[in-house]
């Protein structure tokens, strides 16, 4: 009988140590009821597209994650919907041209990155 209690106790300990991870789409909302963010989670970490919104419903920024690390194009927007900046990440490191824009849509600056460092051509 004592062994049965030990086995049951071990089962509870193992079950309690397992993390409660979330798989699926996680959404948050602004006070006005508009969506604030929509992210895809796998095993409790960001994995896939992540989009954040202004209270007016326009996209604030959008990025893609792979196992919790930025991977792909990341874009930030002005509240009026115009593109504010865009950059490409490869496994968390900036790679390629990163652009910044004025609110009227004209280009403000461009910087080239290689493996997370500015390329000083």
Image (cartoon, helix red, strand yellow):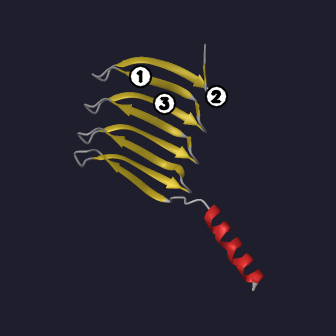
The residue nearer to you, when weighing 22 against 76, is 22
Q: Secondary structure at mark 2?
A: loop
Q: Residue at x 22, y 45 (%)?
A: 32
> How far is disc 3 from disc 1 in space, using C-alphas?
9 Å
According to the picture, the residue beneath numbered tag 3 turns out to be 87
The total number of labels drawn is 3
According to the picture, the residue beneath numbered tag 2 turns out to be 115
Q: Residue at x 52, y 39 (%)?
A: 72
> How far is disc 3 from disc 2 in space, using C-alphas?
13 Å
Q: Position of residue 22 (x, y in %)?
A: 51, 59
Q: Residues within 10 Å of mark 1 (few under 14, many from 20)?
A: many
According to the picture, the residue beneath numbered tag 1 turns out to be 100
> Dividing the image into 4 quarters, which one contains the C terminus?
top right
Q: Residue at x 74, y 76 (%)?
A: 6
Q: Secondary structure at mark 1?
A: strand
Would residue 121 be seen by someone viewing this image from the given angle?
no
Q: Position of residue 89 (x, y in %)?
A: 55, 35
> How far is disc 1 from disc 2 in space, using C-alphas?
19 Å
């Amino acid at each position: 009988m004592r062994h049965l209690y030990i086995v049951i106790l071990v089962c509870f300990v193992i079950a309690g140590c397992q993390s409660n991870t979330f798989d699926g789409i996680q959404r948050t909302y602004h006070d006005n009821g508009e969506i604030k963010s929509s992210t895809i989670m796998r095993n409790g970490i960001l994995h896939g597209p992540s989009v954040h919104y202004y209270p007016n419903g326009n996209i604030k920024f959008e990025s893609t994650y792979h196992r919790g690390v930025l991977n792909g194009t990341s874009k930030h927007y002005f509240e009026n919907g115009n593109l504010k900046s865009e950059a490409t990440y490869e496994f968390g490191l900036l790679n390629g041209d990163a652009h910044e824009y004025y609110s009227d849509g004209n280009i403000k600056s461009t910087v080239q990155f290689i493996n997370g460092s500015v390329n000083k051509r």
